Image: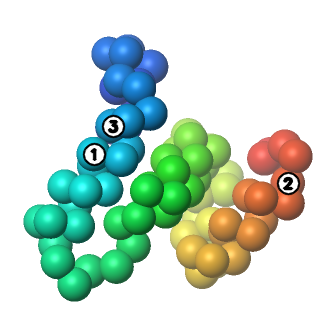
Amino acid sequence: MIVERQETAGWGKSVVKRLSEDLRQEFPGVSGFSIQNLWYIRQFYSEFHDNERLQPPVGEIAWAHNLVIMSKCKVIV
């Protein structure tokens, strides 16, 4: 949703900060909603959402490992 809205509705970068604040308020005590982590989630979605070949293996890898892979790869296949 964030990716599409940023592309079509002109949402800027500040929406991620606001979303982080809203999620932390709505789900107190639940971790994972930092601004940086939401940017990682956005990047992850952008890289893998339409790649049917990569979706199953990516789903089997721990989140932290996926972040390392994305940070080390210049091009995602």
Residue under the image location 74 percent in, 58 percent down:
70
Residue at which label 3 appears: 15
Name above or below for residue 10 compared with residue 42.
above
- Residue 18: % across, % down: 27, 45
Q: CA distance from mark 2 to mark 1?
A: 29 Å
Question: Which quadrant: the N terminus?
Answer: top left
Horizontal side, residue 25 vs residue 76: left or right: left
> Which badge, 2 or 1, comes first in the chain's sequence?
1
Name above or below for residue 40 compared with residue 1.
below
- Residue 10: % across, % down: 37, 16
Horizontal side, residue 18 vs residue 72: left or right: left
Q: Which residue lies most toward the bottom here? A: 29
Amino acid type for the residue under numbered disc 2: Cys
Q: CA distance from mark 3 to mark 2?
A: 27 Å
Name above or below for residue 72 compared with residue 16.
below
Q: Secondary structure at mark 3?
A: helix
Figure colour scheme: rainbow
Q: Is residue 34 visible?
A: yes
Q: Using the image, tell me which numbered label, if any, was put on residue 73.
A: 2
Q: Which residue lies most toward the left here? A: 26
Amino acid type for the residue under numbered disc 1: Arg
Tags 3 and 2 touching, CB below 8 Å? no
Which numbered disc, 3 or 2, marks the residue closer to the eye?
Answer: 3
Give 24 or 49, whichever is nearer the viewer.
Answer: 24
Residue under the image location 33 percent in, 37 percent down:
15
Tags 1 and 3 touching, CB below 8 Å? yes
Question: Which quadrant: the C terminus?
Answer: top right
Residue under the image location 51 percent in, 58 percent down:
36
Residue at which label 1 appears: 18
